[in-house]
Image: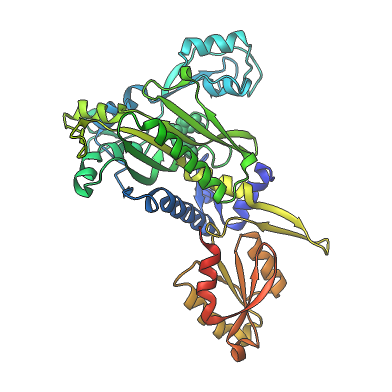
Amino acid sequence: MPTLDTLTTYAKSTGFIYQGSEIYGGLANTWDYGPLGSLLKNNIKKAWIQRFQREFPNNVLLDSGILLNSNVWKASGHIGGFSDPLTECESCHQRFRADNMIHEHDSKVNPDGWTFVQMDDYIKTHQLACPNCQKKAFMPIRAFNMMFQTYQGVVLEKANQIYLRPETAQGIFINFKNIQRTTRNKLPFGVCQVGKAFRNEITPGNFVFRTREFEQMEMEFFVKPGTELEWFDYWKKACKDFLLDLGVNETHLKLEDHEKEALAHYSNATTDILYQFPWGFDELWGIASRTDFDLNAHQEHSKENLSYLDPETNERYVPYVIEPSVGVERLVLTFLNESLVDETLESEEIRTVLKIHPALSPYKVAILPLIKKLHKDQAFEIYQQLSKSFDVTYDDTQNIGKRYRRQDAIGTYFCITVDHETELDQAVTVRHRDTMQQERIKIEALESYISKLIQF
Ligand code: ATP
């Protein structure tokens, strides 16, 4: 598997991910997604929407605002409580997340749910050293609120203060009533949302793993109280299957169930799916059974009735909810890490190939005229035809072998070569990325041939 350095260099040099604000010297830990990265992100989102929304009857989409009434964050507990435990080295004054330091010291210890005093004690008794200067004295832990603040309107005063959302989930809860009323969906049903979230992280890093601006894909799946643990298991499996079906090796995944004592106060079951990133296993996806905590909190603060009338039993209750939540960028890193290989061919030549699931390939097809002067027009016609259905690229520079290698390296699933026979037999040579095998296919059959082989 590639190192983090290899991945970063690869992503920058191919056009997946660039450093943010690069021509101005950059802005720490910000990243821009280039031509290939944008396509990859879109494909990841499409696959997620397909699995979590489209294929599940009654599941629907939502696109709520990034800016919400501040009372949303009071009700959700983010204004009072959305903070990380911040500790500071007394010598070099670098700041760290105390919970991460503890977990990195002993991966069996999970300090979620500990008090600051418990964390302070642990750091002292286990003599944890500053990751920067190795000294062992830290300031007392304090809470650091991670919400980005800004102001609405022209006057920068407290009354106008608002926040960039730190998660997409609350937009779903506050629309529960709207969605239920307008769709008339019966429980259970899920609401899926993809969108930006912002957290003023203390220690961003590891390339795009932890950033202050990122995209989440979250679903709130509303269920009848008492059935939540069955659904929790169902969605936990669906999340894992999503990764396996998109080519993640099962041995690179670990499901970590939170111990009872480590559960957030509102949750009766939580599992993290960990992936083996280049620096070790780390959280990719969180799945939580959140009871009726969120809807109740919004009901209380907004004074709106957010209960549901069960048409079968005539009971009225506040639904329970299962929440699988994953970051798009962590999936980008996962799929690149999983797919980038250097292969030694029979000729002993090394071929770099991104063996990513074709549904995620930035380009499904590259159209390559064998000789630019002779085959360009026909190649372009095929480009126009296929680009109505797929992301297609076109390349007519350098020899065909070099063009194949370039496409392999960015994960393009098929290379289509237009040659002197094409005009005669109305067919092209289709080369497969992973096997490098070639076959002759009629132009009119290309679309259905490709569709079948890239399906997710
Ligand atoms: P962590 O412990 O890694 O900070 P978290 O437990 O705070 O993550 P959640 O609040 O459960 O994360 O968010 C759900 C998902 O959103 C995470 O599993 C992750 O995939 C993604 N995510 C959260 N924070 C970030 C971030 N700063 N950068 C990129 N992705 C993130």
Out of 364 and 380, give the one closest to the viewer. Answer: 364
Q: Is residue 388 above or below residue 274?
A: below
Q: Is residue 264 visible?
A: yes
Camera-side residue: 23 or 364?
A: 364
| Vertical side of 408 occupied by 231: above or below | above
Up the image or down, 142 lies above or below 369; here it is above
**Image coordinates for residue 389, horizontal then vertical, percent:** 45, 70
Write the residue at 65% across / 42% down. Answer: 4
The outermost residue toward the front is 313
The N terminus - image quarter? top right
Q: Which residue does the image show at 61% across and 80% down from the upper left?
A: 428
Up the image or down, 286 lies above or below 92; here it is below
Task: Tell me if 224 is positioned left or right of 322 in this view.
Answer: left
Residue 417 image point, x, y percent: 63, 77
Relative depth, front residue between 158 and 230: 230
Report the label total. Answer: 0
Q: Quadrant of residue 274?
A: top right
Q: Left of 350 or right of it: where is 35?
A: left
Residue 357 percent coordinates (x, y): 57, 56
| Quadrant of res 253 | top right
Q: Is residue 370 left or right of residue 29?
A: right
Left or right: 130 in relation to 164: right
Residue 62 seen by the camera: no
Q: Position of residue 183 (x, y in %)?
A: 23, 49
